[in-house]
Image (cartoon, rainbow, N blue to C red):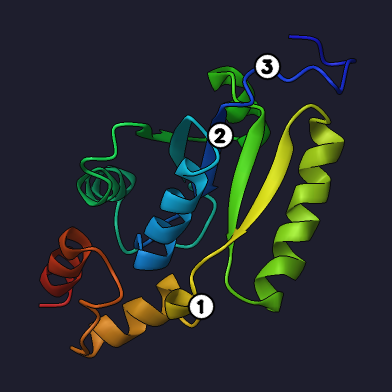
Amino acid sequence: MARNNLNRVPNSKLAVYPGSFDPFTNGHLDVVDRALGIFDKLIVAVAANPEKRQPLFTVDERLQLIRASVNGRDRVEVASFTGLTVEFARSRGASTLVKGLRAYSDFDAELQQALMNRKLAPDIHTVFLMSGFAHIFVSSSILKDIASYGGKVSDLVPPPVARALKEKFR
């Protein structure tokens, strides 16, 4: 791969959608579907970084839940990774990272990360996709909080995730 030629794109038809996805929401699924309108293949990449706070779902559980949620979307692969996102993208031959946005506060944090990724890997591009209006108020942390008190989240997450949340907080 030519790192010095910024105009050379290894595989512009393949993108990586990285995140913790704890849990995977309908907003995440919306971003997956929007990305599939642009790219031929999408890798939903679950960050398995042990330094972060304790997740509700293990990496393996998140992988299973996402696979069940994207079932039928044959152009989506689900994988986990550790380390730098840009290195994972490079190892898979992807030239684009997809990041979902809900609100301006998301943009501020994601822009900082995208700029650092550009510094680390100028050949990897970041594309921001807005989730649909129906999902802009939903965050994984809010969902976990609601579910922990027995609140209804089934209309905010794919059915496999709703069942898993109910089970976790039984």
Secondary structure under badge 1?
loop
- Tag 2: residue type? Ala
The percent coordinates of residue 62 (x first, y second) are 30, 50
Q: Quadrant of residue 15?
A: top right
Is residue 166 positioned above or below 51 on the image?
below
Q: Which residue is mark 3?
A: 10
Task: Tell me the residue that label 2 is attached to.
Answer: 15
55 or 118: nearer the viewer: 118
Classify 42 as above or below 18: above
Q: Position of residue 91 (x, y in %)?
A: 58, 19
Tell which circle, 3 or 1, labels the residue nearer the N-terminal end: 3
Q: The N terminus lies in which quarter of the figure?
A: top right
Q: Earlier in the sequence, mark 1 or mark 2?
A: 2
- Check disc 2: other Cα within 10 Å, few if <14, some if 14-19, many if 20+: many
Q: Which residue is mark 1?
A: 136
Position of residue 157 in the picture relative to residue 135 (left or right): left
Mark 3: secondary structure = loop
Q: How packed is label 1: few (under 14 Cα within 10 Å), some, or many (20 or more)? A: few
Give the residue type at disc 1.
Ile
Residue 156 occupies quadrant: bottom left
Left or right: residue 38 versus residue 69 is right
Residue at x 53% of width, y 20% of height: 92
Q: Judging from the image, what secondary structure is the residue with disc 2 in?
A: strand
Residue 90 is situated, as x and y percent measured from the top left of the image, at 63, 22
**What residue do we see at 48% from left, 70% from top?**
132
